[in-house]
Image (cartoon, rainbow, N blue to C red):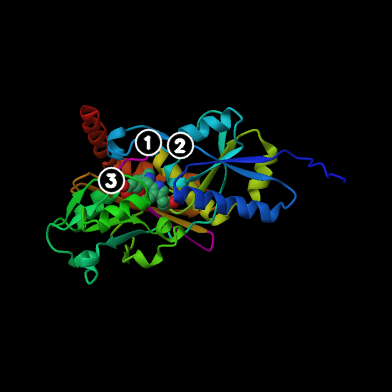
Amino acid sequence: MSTVASPARTVRIGSRKSQLALIQTYWVKDQLQTHFPERQFEVQEVSTKGDKILDVALSKIGDKGLFTKELEQGILDGETDFAVHSLKDVQTKLAEGLILGCITEREDPSDALVVHEKYQNYRLETLPDGAVVGTSSLRRLAQLRHHFPKLAFKDIRGNLNTRLAKLDAGEYDALILATSGMKRMGWHDRIHQTLPPEISLHAVGQGALGIECRANDSDILSLLKVIEHLPTTQACLAERAFLRELEGGCQVPIGVYTSINDGILTLTGLVASIDGQQWVKDSVTGAATEPEAIGIELGQRLRRQGAQAILDAIIAASRTTH
Ligand code: DPM
């Protein structure tokens, strides 16, 4: 019997354990396996702080890299070679020695309304006064309060499976969730309404996957290049530069929307107060080949219009509750 020696090491991929995270990770693994049939890929499941603390609102944990830190440590320690993240959960400043090796094609980045069955014939606009909407996103909260002040809001934590179970059990009348997550889980039929950008600007990076690896690992970087999606990368680099410029973490009422047409990128950004009363929104257009300059310009523009004061007040308030 002859054995064929594998010339290259097995590639180890780090993933969170939630069903959505594993669906995303196995999608990446399958793509790479198709492109590189001679290589071996294996998935290692890692539990993150964000998966363990389920009884506290995300915004109150106030920790950077809640869903990414343990995965990053695994890469730095050489236990894994790269990690697959929902890009929106990836901080704008990565740990020393790590980079985003690629960003994959974005799913629909919008937010979606999911309702309890008793509200099947309602729209977000027609939900009765005081209907209880579950979200722990300050971004969703601020925008919905702004547009629909008659609704009531309640924190919700846990993975998508847990959240839908809580909705169906009657703890909430409706939820706002990412369209992309619902679609990747195969739950298209539970999306009751997708919210247009006029109602809800999405989170920075929403709907895209970010793959994080060692900055000096040329083998892994060359593998990842084949699943990079250029327009998504340009859009997300603009969005991330905008967030970085405003020094916003993953829990701030900051929303964005990006379009690219004929090489021209338009980035719209919003900074709002949590009560939805203060509202600073603007857009910047430029060459899609210079996405970060567009993001920085938009951040500076919003700051001049009062965004910094809104964010400072939110940070000061969250410090006193920690
Ligand atoms: C971040 C936020 C949320 C997640 C904040 C925000 C939503 C929390 C909530 C940064 N991460 O969006 O303003 O609504 O209580 C998360 C989801 C996905 C990645 C789930 C979701 C899937 C979508 C994607 C949680 N992270 O937003 O419904 O891949 O972008």
* Quarter of the image where one finds residue 48: top left
Q: How many marks?
A: 3
Q: Which residue is mark 2?
A: 47
The alpha-carbon separation of the residues under discs 1 and 3 comes to 16 Å
The mark that comes first in sequence, 1 or 3, is: 1
Specify whether tag 3 is near ligand 1 (CB below 8 Å): yes
Is 103 on the left or on the right of 65, as rendered? Answer: right
Image point 30% across, 51% down: which residue?
281
User: Could you tell me if the residues under marks 1 and 2 are in contact, i.e. CB atoms within 8 Å?
Assistant: yes
Query: Which numbered disc covers residue 52?
Result: 1
Q: Can you give x and y, in whole percent of width and height, for residue 262 in the image?
A: 53, 63
Secondary element type, mark 3: loop
Query: Which numbered disc covers residue 136?
Result: 3
Q: Mark 3 vs mark 2: give the one in front.
A: 2
Whether the magenta-drawn stretch holds residue 259 is answered as yes
The alpha-carbon separation of the residues under discs 3 and 2 comes to 21 Å
Is 131 on the left or on the right of 116, as rendered? Answer: left
The alpha-carbon separation of the residues under discs 1 and 2 comes to 7 Å
Whether the magenta-drawn stretch holds residue 180 is answered as no
Secondary element type, mark 1: helix
Q: Can you give x and y, in whole percent of width and height, for residue 284 in the image?
A: 40, 52
Task: Say which amino acid is labelled 3.
Answer: Ser
Asked whether residue 269 appears in the rendered view, the answer is no
Name above or below for residue 111 compared with residue 278: below
Q: Of 128 and 13, which appears nearest the observer? A: 13
Q: Can you give x and y, in whole percent of width and height, for residue 106 in the image?
A: 49, 56
Task: Say which amino acid is labelled 1.
Answer: Lys
Image: magenta residue range:
246-263
Name above or below for residue 127 compared with residue 293: below
User: Which quadrant holds the C terminus?
Assistant: top left
Secondary element type, mark 2: loop
